[in-house]
Image (cartoon, rainbow, N blue to C red):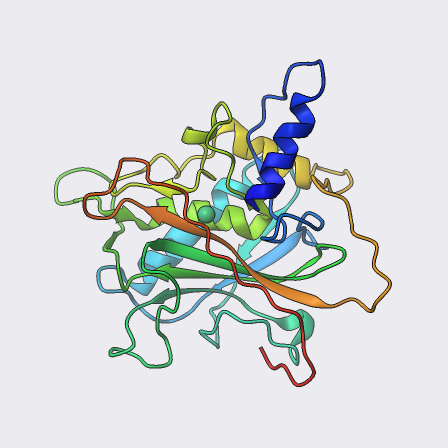
Amino acid sequence: MTRAALWVVAAIGGALFAPPAQAYLCSREATGVGPSHFWPVRDVELNVYDKAGEEVSVADIEAAIDFAIAQWNGVECSDFVLRRGPGAQDPRAVYDWAAGAFNENVVVVRQKAENDAVDDWLHPVSALAITTATYVRPSGKVLDTDIEINDAAFVFSACDPGPGCTVRHDLTNTLVHEVGHVVGLDHPLSTQPGAATATMFASAPEGDLQKRDLDQDDIDGICFLYPTGGETGACYPEVPREEPPDVTITEVGGCASTGAGGALWPLLVLVVRFRKRRPGDTS
Ligand SMILES: [Zn+2]
């Protein structure tokens, strides 16, 4: 992913015109090759799994997802539509091959194995949340996205600043960002103008509320991908392949936070995992 970003900068830098204003980047395979990720449909349903976090209730998660959906749906230059469904049946962040088009895009909090052996946070502790996308490798067509919130290592809050509310890691702030990954946006390069204030910026210190509202750069990103009435945009082209299409899974981004003693804007944490489909693979 980093190499891909550098390629973009190098390509722009070789031209004699001014670099474009945008900082947004399309999601793509973490190796920095391959096409942009995109949904072949423009109506995607997210389902919250019925499990509360330590400090936030299921209703809090649903409200935060509703808020996040409203932010991205409210962009007028895009006709991509997100909806919250009736709730997830399965807490796993996997693509169910048997379910096919009926896969659930899950939103779930993860805690520790001693609390729930089935529902553990299995990613690096420094990641505040992770969105896992399953997609067709040659085309970039997204089949499934699942959001996991790291309630094992961070304290989340779900309230607006004011009397009685101490903002910790704001759940809404986190989920507006993660839904941007669902849409197909990656983290912008921190060196790009406007990146640090974008919702899709890679890290969020405790108390951050900046990502609740989309920046113009985030709006430009979704409108590039799914312009109203227009063809789906691509930052990177499809990759011709002779072999049958396979599918890969990648964790789009480990969205970092400041930990104890951490810098205000810590180093980007990217957590990547991908694999090819194998016979008998059930995940
Ligand atoms: Zn992220």
Which one is in front, 236 or 71? 236
x and y percentages locating residue 62 in the rendered image:
39, 58
Q: Is residue 77 visible?
A: no
x and y percentages locating residue 190 in the rendered image:
46, 32
Q: Is residue 75 above or below residue 93?
A: above
Q: Residue at x 72, y 42 (%)?
A: 236
- Asked if residue 248 lies left or right of residue 214, the reply is right
Which residue of the protein is positioned furthest toward the left in this rendering? 164
Q: Quadrant of the C terminus?
A: bottom right
Residue 243, picture quadrant: bottom right
Which one is in front, 125 or 142? 125
Which residue of the protein is positioned furthest toward the bottom in this rendering? 280
Q: Is residue 113 above or below residue 242?
A: below
Which one is in front, 15 or 26? 15
Q: Is residue 43 visible?
A: yes
x and y percentages locating residue 35 in the rendered image:
71, 49
Which one is in front, 56 or 242? 242
x and y percentages locating residue 158 in the rendered image:
27, 50
- Asked if residue 268 lies left or right of residue 207, the reply is right
Q: Residue at x 24, y 79 (%)?
A: 114
- Asked if residue 222 lies left or right of residue 256, the reply is right
Q: Report how many numbered discs are placed on residues in the image.
A: 0
Q: Residue at x 19, y 47 (%)?
A: 260
Q: Is residue 210 above or below residue 19?
A: below
Residue 97, picture quadrant: bottom right
